[in-house]
Image (cartoon, rainbow, N blue to C red):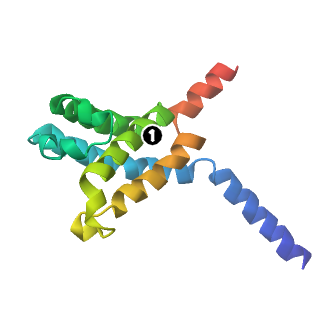
């Protein structure tokens, strides 16, 4: 029985050690891919924000659609790079949360939950995935962690 407890403690210790970098790294990479794809689509596409501007939450409904388009596109592109590197992760997570919530409210909210009907399932998942990065940071496998260690000395 003591060896089972010892083994359990060893496994938990190992999980704790990798838990400081692997989950956050996985979240960062998945989210970076998704937001990069969306940003590239905007970069190469036509600005369709004029069609949904009336649905934008305040204060975004007051902004010119070209400014909104540029802010969303560059937040998605630069935020994706920041997430991959783990640099400015909390800043980019907050920016991407804003983009996500605006997209949820203006494009997805009235379509139900289902992804196939352009519903709000994916924006919900992105929001839930961004929250740990906002509140806990990028984890140990990041430039944020390296910079923090350098400044702690």
Q: In the rendering, at what x and y percent does residue 112 appear? A: 30, 67
Q: Residue furthest left?
A: 46
Q: Is residue 15 above or below residue 32?
A: below
**Residue at (55% x, 48% y) in the render:** 132
Residue 144 found in image quarter: top right
**Residue at (12% x, 46% y) in the render:** 51
> Which residue has dot 1 on it?
93
Q: Residue furthest bottom?
A: 1
Q: Which quadrant holds the C terminus?
A: top right
Direction from residue 143 to residue 69 in the image, left or right: left
Direction from residue 72 to residue 24 in the image, left or right: right
Between 122 and 41, the one lying in front of the other is 122
**Residue at (58% x, 30% y) in the render:** 146
Circle 1 sits in a helix, a strand or a loop, which is it? helix
Q: In the rendering, at what x and y percent does residue 78 appear? A: 32, 33
Between 27 and 68, the one lying in front of the other is 68
Between 131 and 13, the one lying in front of the other is 131
Q: Is residue 43 visible?
A: yes
Q: Which quadrant holds the N terminus?
A: bottom right
Q: Is residue 140 visible?
A: no
Q: In the rendering, at what x and y percent does residue 103 appear? A: 29, 48
Q: Residues within 10 Å of mark 1 (few under 14, many from 20)?
A: many
Q: In the rendering, at what x and y percent does residue 30 appear? A: 39, 53
């Amino acid at each position: 029985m003591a060896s089972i407890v010892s083994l359990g403690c060893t496994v938990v210790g190992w999980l704790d050690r990798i838990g400081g970098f692997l989950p956050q790294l996985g979240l960062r990479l998945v989210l970076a891919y998704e937001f990069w794809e969306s940003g590239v689509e905007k970069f190469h596409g036509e600005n369709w924000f004029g069609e949904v501007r009336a649905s934008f939450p305040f204060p975004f409904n007051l902004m010119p659609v070209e400014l909104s388009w540029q802010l969303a596109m560059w937040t998605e592109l630069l935020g994706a790079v920041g997430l991959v590197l783990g640099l400015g992760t909390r800043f980019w997570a907050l920016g991407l949360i804003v983009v996500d919530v605006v997209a949820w409210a203006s494009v997805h909210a009235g379509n139900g939950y289902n992804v196939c009907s352009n519903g709000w399932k994916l924006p919900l998942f992105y929001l839930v995935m961004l929250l740990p990065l906002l509140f806990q940071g990028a984890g140990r496998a990041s430039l944020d962690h390296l910079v923090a260690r350098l400044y702690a000395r």
